[in-house]
Image (cartoon, grey):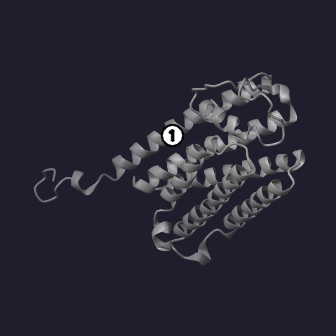
């Protein structure tokens, strides 16, 4: 079973990541909901570590001795800090602790997204795993930027207008993250909807930059997938060498 998960690691990671995205709004803000969400987050971190390490081993030709150990150590260190923050925030959340947690998640999600993007660019064939990796990278970018917006709002509550859904939220105490995840997805796809709106100049520029990143990512992704498909077509699309006809 472990071998199956490893062979389909990017699909498994996308499934957990997508489930967390879909389930988070239904969790609410109760203690049980926060615990459930934290379990999902830990699952995301562990699966992300599995994918990063497995990709590094595959890049080294399956030889663990040749894999880039620095890459692995950085991934585990970032994940350890993020998990420690998640556990501590459940016990005694403070504004400083949540800010440190947001920074650690920002760095970790950015690191994993960069690792997946690099692996995707080095891929030679379009497979289901390639597609899953590209989608999960897109969602990781949105998660990373939601942490940026969370930090901005924590340090300057006037940087965003939280609208009616954000009434009663407390900057720097984590109860705005759900709103910023939705806002980040909208900004990344240049289809911002909802009550959250950037007010300060920095918040407006951050929103525009995320939109540009989303457009550039999609353009590079489509070009890369098309290039791989043209360079390595399926066997049934290759010409028949004996007759000169398409098989």
- Left or right: 94, with 51 as reference point: right
**Residue 23 drawn at (x, y percent):** 58, 46
Density class for disc 1 (Cα within 10 Å; few <14, some 14-19, many ≥20) is few
- Left or right: 102, with 207 as reference point: right
**Residue 7 drawn at (x, y percent):** 46, 66
Residue bearing mark 1 = 220
- Left or right: 150, with 245 as reference point: right
- Left or right: 101, with 42 as reference point: right
In front here: 133 or 162?
Answer: 162
Where residue 163 sits, quadrant-wise, is top right
Q: Secondary structure at mark 1?
A: helix
The answer to whether one can see residue 212 in this image is: no
In front here: 244 or 72?
Answer: 72
Vertical order, 177 against 131 (above or below): above
**Residue 194 drawn at (x, y percent):** 64, 25
**Residue 149 drawn at (x, y percent):** 75, 35
- Residue under the image location 35 percent in, 50 percent down: 231
In front here: 17 or 89?
Answer: 89
The answer to whether one can see residue 58 in this image is: yes
Count of marks, rendered view: 1
Vertical order, 24 against 72 (above or below): above
- Residue under the image location 75 percent in, 37 percent down: 176
- Residue under the image location 69 percent in, 34 percent down: 179
Q: Furthest residue to the left?
A: 243
- Residue under the image location 77 percent in, 21 percent down: 199
């Amino acid at each position: 079973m472990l071998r199956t998960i490893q062979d389909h690691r990017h699909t498994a990671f996308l499934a957990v990541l997508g489930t967390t995205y879909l389930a988070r709004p239904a969790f609410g803000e109760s203690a049980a909901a926060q615990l459930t969400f934290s379990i999902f987050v830990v699952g995301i971190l562990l699966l992300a570590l599995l994918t990063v390490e497995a990709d590094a081993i595959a890049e080294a030709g399956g030889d663990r001795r040749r894999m880039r150990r620095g890459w692995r150590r950085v991934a585990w260190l970032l994940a350890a800090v993020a998990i420690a923050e998640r556990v501590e925030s459940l016990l005694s959340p403070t504004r400083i602790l949540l800010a440190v947690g947001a920074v650690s998640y920002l760095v970790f999600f950015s690191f994993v997204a960069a690792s997946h993007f690099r692996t995707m660019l080095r891929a030679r064939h379009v497979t289901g795993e390639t597609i899953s990796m590209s989608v999960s990278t897109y969602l990781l970018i949105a998660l990373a930027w939601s942490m940026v917006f969370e930090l901005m709002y924590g340090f300057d509550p006037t940087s965003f207008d939280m609208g009616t859904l954000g009434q009663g939220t407390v900057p720097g105490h984590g109860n705005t993250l759900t709103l910023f995840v939705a806002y980040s997805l909208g900004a990344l796809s240049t289809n911002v909807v909802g009550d959250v709106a950037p007010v300060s100049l920095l918040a407006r520029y951050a929103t525009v930059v995320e939109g540009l990143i989303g457009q550039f990512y999609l353009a590079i992704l489509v070009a890369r997938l098309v290039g791989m498909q043209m360079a390595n077509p399926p066997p049934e699309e290759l010409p028949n060498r004996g007759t000169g006809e398409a098989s």
